[in-house]
Image: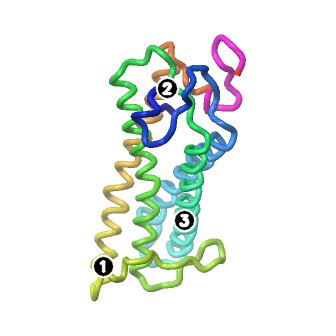
Amino acid sequence: MTTTSSSKASPLPVEPTSTPRRYSAPSAALHWIIAALILIQLGLGWYMNEILPDHSSAQDRIEALHIEIGLSLLVLVLVRIAVRIAKPAPRMPEGIAGWERVLAQTVHYLLYALLLVVPLSGWALVTTRHAPISFWGIHWPSLPGVLAVAGGSPRALGRTLKDVHIFWLIWVLVVALALHLAGAVKHQFDGHPVLWRMVPFLRRPGGPT
């Protein structure tokens, strides 16, 4: 995970000193929990839409789990943003090209945006169904304003939201994740290692963690 070296240019704060350090323990834990849940969500989404029969009881169970994990992701991402504001991220290593810094920052904040918009679109989608929303056994409210926007055509809005959620936002998220991972791996082997800052068992190159 990388950020720009200038806190003034970044919507979220970056560490003002140039001393390399790890991400805070809460930031690292949230990063990996969110990453694991994203992979689970991608797998569940593919399984229930491409493998299971439509409108089957099995599909309904997987969809319910998918919704609960999606809402959990929304909560965790909000916590992650709060932690990031409270505990600024480490600066990027010196020597990284300017265009790479710009690309890293763009992908980084695109991911933040997508990790909010994707679960919000899913929440909006289930709201159009007028059915109770369960969050691990607790009632979760409908997304305010969705039914007002839908007017007398909640099903039409639901179909549009489903297309946006599955065929647009998810693929943009996959591409952004691929760019994020590719950038981290590239820097790891081009003399500007960054993985040690987020991976607990990796040592800081050339010095203590």
Q: Quadrant of the C terminus?
A: top right
Frontmost residue, 9 versus 122:
9
Q: Please tell me which residue is depicted at 33% across the width and 69% down the height of the picture.
A: 161
Frontmost residue, 67 versus 95:
95
Image height of 104 relative to 129, above or below: above
**Residue 131 in the figure: left or right of residue 69:** left
Name the spot of residue 198 as percent of width and height, x first: 61, 33
Q: Which residue is mark 3?
A: 71
Q: Are marks 3 and 1 in contact (CB under 8 Å)?
A: no
The image quarter containing residue 139 is bottom right
The numbered mark at residue 115 is: none
Q: Spatial distance from mark 1 to mark 2, Cα to Cα?
A: 43 Å
Image height of 65 relative to 76, above or below: below
Name the spot of residue 125 as percent of width and height, x first: 40, 73
Pointer 1 or 2: first along the chain: 1
Three-letter residue code for mark 3: Leu
**Residue 141 in the figure: left or right of residue 138:** left
Q: Residues within 10 Å of mark 2 (few under 14, many from 20)?
A: some
Q: Residues within 10 Å of mark 3 (few under 14, many from 20)?
A: many
Q: Which residue is mark 2?
A: 185
- Region rendered in magenta: 197-208
Three-letter residue code for mark 1: Val
Q: Spatial distance from mark 3 to mark 1, Cα to Cα?
A: 21 Å
Name the spot of residue 37 as percent of width and height, x first: 57, 53
Q: Which residue is mark 1?
A: 149
Name the spot of residue 60 as percent of width and height, x first: 51, 75
